[in-house]
Image: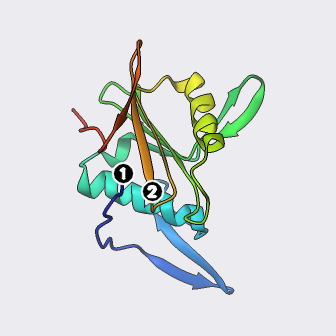
Amino acid sequence: MRIEFSKYNLKIHSKNDQLFIFDEVRKKNVILTPEEWVRQHFIHFFIQDLSYPKGKIAIEKEFTINGLKKRFDLLVFDKDTQPFLLLECKAQSEVLSEKVLQQCLNYNIKFAVPYLAISNGDYTHAWQITAKKIIELDRFPVYHD
């Protein structure tokens, strides 16, 4: 699916020849890498366009799986603070390969979300995961509070 990002009011500034963007979830400036550009657009898309609560979004948190430390890109929690949607972000120049999907599926061993997505900002794939099957979606799920 293709996401039509709105024109968000992104707070970007330069310091010592490095671009930074203000992350409204983490409440701090972060280096504006190509992957961060994708992540920040999804943060704004989820909050402004889909009405996901800002307080239910976690960004780049470390977790352990099979004894290895990993870091997810974006995890949305439901109203009961259960993992709801896991999004793996890649730079626009990166192809959304089976390897990227496998990375997200491996992370989902820890979180067992009902919705999983991968995106490079230009292309996005999202799935609903049930006990019996995986269903490809043509849009992101509605958030129920």
Q: Quadrant of the C terminus?
A: top left
Instruction: State the residue position of label 2.
Output: 123
Does 43 appear above or below 134? below
Say the numbered circle drawn on residue 1. 1
- Residue 112 in the image: state x and y as whole percent: 49, 22
The mark total stands at 2
Other residues around mark 1 within 10 Å, as few (<14) / some (14–19) / many (≥20): some
Looking at the picture, how far across and down is residue 20, in whole percent?
A: 57, 74
For residue 29, above or below residue 136: below
**Residue shown at the point (74%, 35%) measured from the top left:** 69
Residue 78 location (% of width, % of height): 33, 30
Asked if residue 141 lies left or right of residue 67, the reply is left
Q: Secondary structure at mark 2?
A: loop
Residue at 60% in and 56% down: 95
Residue 94 against residue 140 in the figure, above or below: below
Looking at the picture, tell me which residue is in the foreground, 60 or 66: 66
Kindly state the secondary structure of the residue where label 1 is placed. Answer: loop
Left-right relation of 3 to 95: left
**In the image shown, does 95 or 59 lie closer to the viewer?**
95
Residue type highlighted by circle 1 = Met
Q: Which residue is painted at 60% across and 66% down in the image? A: 93
Image vertical order of residue 81 relative to residue 121, above or below: above
Q: Amino acid at mark 2?
A: Tyr
Looking at the rendered structure, which numbered label has been put on residue 54?
A: none
Is residue 74 shown left or right of residue 133? right
- Mark 2 surroundings: few (<14), some (14-19) or many (≥20) residues within 10 A: few
**Mark 2 in CB contact with mark 1 (< 8 angstroms):** yes
Pointer 2 or 1: first along the chain: 1
